């Protein structure tokens, strides 16, 4: 139920969105091109981020960059880092946040610091959005008719008393197809 709740609260039309603290992979680095300079920088940043306690993977598959971006998005990886030769010439790389889909350009010197900041910001903002969503969508039912009306006509959560009896639970399931936590 916890995983289902996480998916329901944080996912969007583009796929899974995982909070950084529970994501098995927090950052994915996608090299664009296969030059030695790009590969060296990818390995350097993978090592720096790993040493700072961030879970990092590098996508070295033969798929196109667009496919890799979409795959990372569907899988809910919180931060995507794109590193290509053009970026190296301009001394910058591109980050993409999964939760807001916002892209940002960062100097090569600030990558490790900025990743940590972005992950912490994402964690806090996702938590606050989830809390606000919960508060806006939680209703209180003080009697059974109100409970049925809320379940039938509104989305979200209902706070209601329940006696704990299996017969009551079956009646609720029969009347409104609701489940409880």
Image (cartoon, helix red, strand yellow):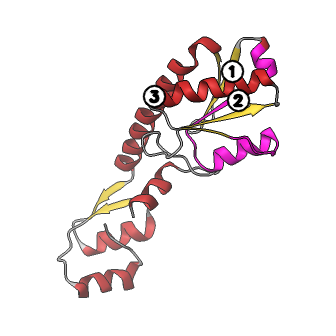
Q: Which residue is mark 1?
A: 93
Label whose residue precedes the other's in the sequence (1 or 3) = 1
Residue 139 location (% of width, % of height):
32, 57
Quarter that holds the N terminus = bottom left
In this rendering, would 12 be left or right of 64?
Answer: left
Q: Secondary structure at mark 2?
A: strand
Question: In the depicted view, which residue is nearer to us: 99 or 93?
Answer: 93
Question: What is the quadrant of residue 40 in the picture?
Answer: top right
Question: In the depicted view, which residue is nearer to us: 168 or 105?
Answer: 105
Q: Which residue is mark 3?
A: 121
Q: Marks 3 and 2, Cα distance to the nearest angstrom?
A: 20 Å
Label whose residue precedes the other's in the sequence (3 or 2) = 2
Classify 178 as above or below 124.
below
- Number of other residues with Cα within 10 Å of mark 1, as a class: few under 14, some 14 to 19, many 20 or more: many
- Examine the structure image and report whether residue 65 is included in the region drawn in magenta: yes
Residue 52 location (% of width, % of height):
46, 26
Residue drawn at 60 percent across, 11 percent down: 109
- Callout 2 touching callout 1 (CB < 8 Å): yes
Question: In the depicted view, which residue is nearer to us: 25 or 134?
Answer: 25
Q: Which residues are magenta?
A: 59-88
């Amino acid at each position: 139920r916890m995983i289902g709740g996480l998916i329901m609260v944080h996912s969007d039309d583009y796929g899974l969105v995982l909070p950084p603290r529970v994501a098995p992979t927090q950052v994915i680095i996608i090299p664009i091109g296969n030059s030695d300079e790009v590969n060296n920088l990818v390995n350097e940043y993978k090592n720096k981020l790993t040493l700072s306690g961030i879970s990092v993977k590098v996508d070295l598959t033969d798929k196109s960059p667009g496919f890799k971006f979409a795959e990372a998005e569907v899988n809910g990886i919180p931060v995507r880092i794109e590193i290509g030769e053009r970026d190296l010439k301009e001394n910058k790389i591109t980050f993409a946040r999964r939760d807001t889909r916002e892209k940002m350009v960062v100097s090569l010197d600030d990558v490790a610091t900025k990743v940590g900041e972005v992950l912490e910001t994402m964690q806090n903002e996702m938590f606050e959005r989830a809390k606000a969503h919960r508060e806006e969508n939680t209703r209180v039912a003080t009697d059974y008719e109100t409970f049925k009306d809320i379940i039938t006509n509104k989305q979200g959560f209902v706070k209601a008393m329940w006696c704990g009896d299996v017969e009551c639970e079956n009646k609720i399931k029969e009347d409104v197809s609701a489940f409880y936590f």
